[in-house]
Amino acid sequence: MLLEIITPDKKIFSGEVESATFPGSEGSFQVLNNHAPLISSLEEGKIRYRTGAGEFEVTVNGGVVEVLKNKIIVLAESAKS
Amino acid sequence: MANLKEVKSRISSVSSTQQITRAMKMVAASKLRRAQERITQMRPYAQKLGEILRNVSGGQGDDDASVYSTRREINRVLIIAITSDKGLCGGFNSNVFRATTALLKEKYVRQYTKEQVVILPIGKKALDNYRKRGFEIVPDFGGIFSDLSFDTAKLAAEYAMEAFKNDEYDRVELVYNEFKNVATQIMRTEQFLPIPEAEVDGESNSNTIDYIFEPSKDYIVEELIPTSLKIQFYKALLESNAAEHGARMTAMDKATENAGELLKELKLKYNRTRQAAITTEILEIVAGAEALGGR
């Protein structure tokens, strides 16, 4: 599935991932392939995602994530890897 | 006939001015490209945010519950005037001042006469101008353009939002130049707070997807509205930034052209003067020789 992490200044990440874990405001949760449509707000914390090349981390200061048809879009005010 | 030396020194001064304006035009052009890139960078974020916001708030009608859309009697007004840090960009800054003055004299006459209007200048030109003219100002955000990013921009937006929430201001207006193309800037006066009522578009609910909302719709709306306000503000800053470089580029292009014309005229004058000087010299020599030979 496709993961995109976007801030107003630039696109932080865009690519295929196998799984992604988010710091949701009600606790952390993981998204795998074929997840149901979801919109969730995020707390300050780390997004972890696994690609073929290994596992990566991006720190965000909160925001919102939308999961729809194997496409995950993260909108964060600021983020750094 | 003008002095040869005088004309020559004018030529060199005009051509060095031309060099400067040409260089400034180049610089503005490259900065403009970067400013435009920034706008395109921000666009997907703004678009997606709008989409999600529509998805979340769609179906539950108007969200008048938000603290940022409460309408009060207008007593105190905050005007955010966005200009540039540097001059030499044609009417760019004076247009902002004119639009702000128009706003004061038309829409907010009552508040203005009671001195209930505060200006939040963005950019050094606005800061200097309104400070000199003795307006009540919020001077903290004048230098935002020296390091323009969402993180710095959002501080100013947060200030305005916080003050609005605390009833310090009852209305916040944005005045800025919108970037249409390199040669054209459009003056915009926009109501920032309270959030203007959205136009109703009938098709927004036609294809709603059954999302899971985490933790709840209302919570997400609460979270997203401030973000979308900050984005709106940031967008105005970026537009103004791009418009500034566009305006400077056009102004400097004109200046370079005018300098070129002036140079042409001066060169013509120089050559004429030179020729006239040579003619007089020859006349004098010939006359002198004749006077000698006639003897």
Image (spheres, rainbow, N blue to C red):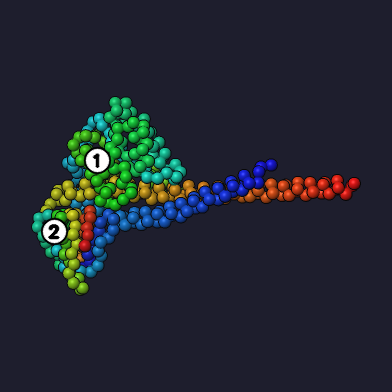
Q: Is residue B137 left or right of residue B28?
A: left
> At label 2, which amino acid type do we have?
Pro
Instruction: Name the residue: 11% across, 61% down.
Output: A29
**Residue found at x 37% / y 54%:** B35
Distance from disc 1 to disc 2, alpha carbons, whole Å, reads 29 Å
Residue annotated with mark 2: A23
Q: Which mark is residue B160?
A: 1
Crowding at mark 2 (Cα within 10 Å: few <14, some 14-19, many 20+): many
Q: Amino acid at mark 1?
A: Ala
- Chain ID of residue with mark 2: A
Q: Can marks 1 and 2 be said to lie on one chain?
A: no
Q: Residue B183: give x, y in percent of width and height.
A: 46, 49
Q: What element does badge 1 sit on?
A: helix
Q: Nearer the viewer, residue B116 or B284?
A: B284
Judge whether residue A37 can be spotted in this image. Answer: no
User: Viewed as shown, does residue B186 lie left or right of A55?
Assistant: right
Q: Quadrant of residue A32?
A: bottom left
Q: Position of residue B195 (x, y in %)?
A: 25, 41
Disc 1 vs disc 2: Cβ atoms closer than 8 Å? no
- Residue projecting furthest to the bottom: A52
Residue lying at 52% horizontally and 49% vertically, measured from the top left: B17
Per the image, label 2 sits on a secondary structure element best described as: strand
Q: Position of residue B89 (x, y in %)?
A: 44, 45
Farthest right residue? B295
Residue at the left extreme?
Answer: A27
10 Å crowding of disc 1: few (<14), some (14-19), many (20+):
many
Residue B282 placed where, x, y %? 78, 49
